Image: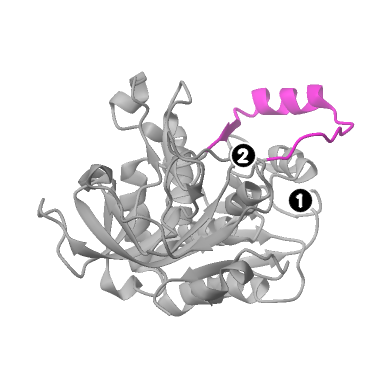
Amino acid sequence: MRAVTVTPGVPDSLRLTDEWPEPEPEEGAILVEALAVGVCGTDHEIIAGAYGEAPPGQERLVLGHESLGRVLEDPTGTLHPGDLVAGVVRHPDPVPCANCAMDEWDMCRNGQYTEHGIKGLPGFARDRWRLQPKFAVGLDEALASVGMLLEPTSVVAKAWDHIERIGRRAEWKPKTALITGAGPIGLLAALLASQRELSVHVLDRNTTGPKPDLVRALGATYHSSTVAELDLQPDVVVECTGAPPVVLDAMCKAAPTGIVCLTGVSSGGRTIDFDAGALNRELVLENNVVFGSVNAGRRHWDLAAQALARADRSWLNSLITRRVPVSAYQEAYASTGEDIKVVLDFAQ
């Protein structure tokens, strides 16, 4: 069957093969026919050779962790043939650590987890794949064109879950949310904020293209200024850029008892002259919280599926700026700088 693969650690080793073996039964009882996979920055970094790990005993890694498929067979009865399904990316470590033992694999403490298309597990960019029932997330049929957005939505569903858990430390009735960055994660974070009926503000450097309109379609306000220039004190900040100046400004902008969730990953290697003492004083005296969030547990995938089911379908479809057939796979992984979400389409 067809599969899009790389040799981890070897830059520009991206290949499409039509001779990849069928998925082994050991991968899971549920057999799925691929419909599409989303492409994200993680894929670009793996293709560049920055990281990635093939399954044990294999030289190449199948890419793809933002999955969507249809069930071909499920002898367990968890799902039924024809059902839409997405696969949970991360699997618990074999030890397991205390968190993985409780199915909180997104909070793995020893780093021995595995991830489809990233670390030690084949990805979903192949014609057929298998899942264990606990890692199979059923989707509403209405999401047939956008279900590959479930993985990035699960990331922000976790962020909001943890924001709300932290908020329960005291009487807390947030009114305003600031989202920094209007990529897929930022826009989906704004979607979930709007579903919570908050006053939503999204900041991004783009002044043209689809992003401003997508933000306004949520009933949110779009800004292209700096964080420091904003005339507001948000109760919640979800930082999605990883840009150090934006991260630091976001931490300073939150209202008293505010919560700042960092989801963007910084590349490092950049030094900024910054008054850390003043930031520390402000965080302490205002009872603010800053925390990082990555990946998602099973409950977050289920929350994400519910959020997508409630969302406007045309808005979700607008996030997908290119749909590329597998035969033109190289185009899907070539960044144009103008895309929001690119999808590799296995159904074309």
- Between 256 and 131, the residue placed more toward the observer is 131
Residue in the foreground of this view, choosing between 27 and 229: 27
Look at the numbered discs 2 and 1 and tell me whether their residues touch, using CB distance below 8 Å: no
Under circle 1, the secondary element is loop
Q: Is residue 41 visible?
A: yes
Q: Mark 2 points at which residue?
A: 51
> For the residue labelled by badge 2, is the local secondary structure a helix, a strand or a loop?
loop
Task: Identify the residue at the far right of this view.
Answer: 273
* Residue 283 part of the magenta segment: yes
Q: Does the magenta stretch include residue 189?
A: no
- Which residues are drawn in magenta? 266-293
Residue 124, relative to residue 262: is it above or below? below
Depth check: give the residue in front, 244 or 128: 128
User: On the rendered image, what quadrant is the C terminus found in?
Assistant: bottom left
Question: Residue 227, labelled with which disc?
Answer: 1
Residue in view at x 67 percent, y 28 percent: 283
